[in-house]
Image (spheres, rainbow, N blue to C red):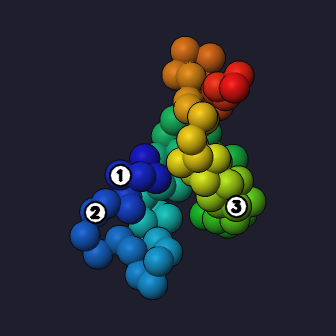
Amino acid sequence: RLLEQSHIPGMKSGGGLKSKAYTAIENNMIDRFGKDFTKDKIKNKLKYAKPNLIVTKEILNTSGFGYDSINKCIDVDPQ
């Protein structure tokens, strides 16, 4: 859902998501998981997840590393 919002024209501003994108994400999360999801909680989760996603992307772009979709983890060539 987050990725979908980031691809909708007018939902991003200056490299981040606009308030209306967070509102759409919040509504979707509430529908799926209950009222515990707020914009602030979503923003906080993204703040802490983003550095890990950047490192993961760098690892996967390195020779010898790949993604195992069955086990949902990074796979490393033994050599």
Q: Residue at x 70, y 61 (%)?
A: 51
Q: CA distance from mark 3 to mark 2?
A: 23 Å
Secondary structure state at the residue bearing disc 2: loop
Q: Are marks 1 and 2 in contact (CB under 8 Å)?
A: yes
Secondary structure state at the residue bearing disc 3: helix
Residue 11 at what x, y percent from top left? 35, 71
Mark 2 belongs to which amino acid? Ile
Residue situated furthest front in the rendering: 79
Does residue 19 appear anywhere in the picture? Answer: no
Q: Which mark is residue 43?
A: none
Residue situated furthest bottom in the rendering: 14
Q: Which one is in front, 29 or 43?
A: 43
Q: Which mark is residue 51?
A: 3
Q: Quadrant of residue 45?
A: bottom right
- Direction from residue 4 to residue 36 in the image, left or right: right
Per the image, the residue denoted by label 1 is 4
Q: Quadrant of the C terminus?
A: top right
Residue 13 at what x, y percent from top left? 41, 81
Q: CA distance from mark 3 to mark 1?
A: 20 Å
- The nearer-to-camera label among 3 and 1 is 3
Q: Which mark is residue 8?
A: 2
Q: Quadrant of residue 43?
A: bottom right
Up the image or down, 45 lies above or below 19; here it is above
Q: Residue at x 37, y 58 (%)?
A: 5
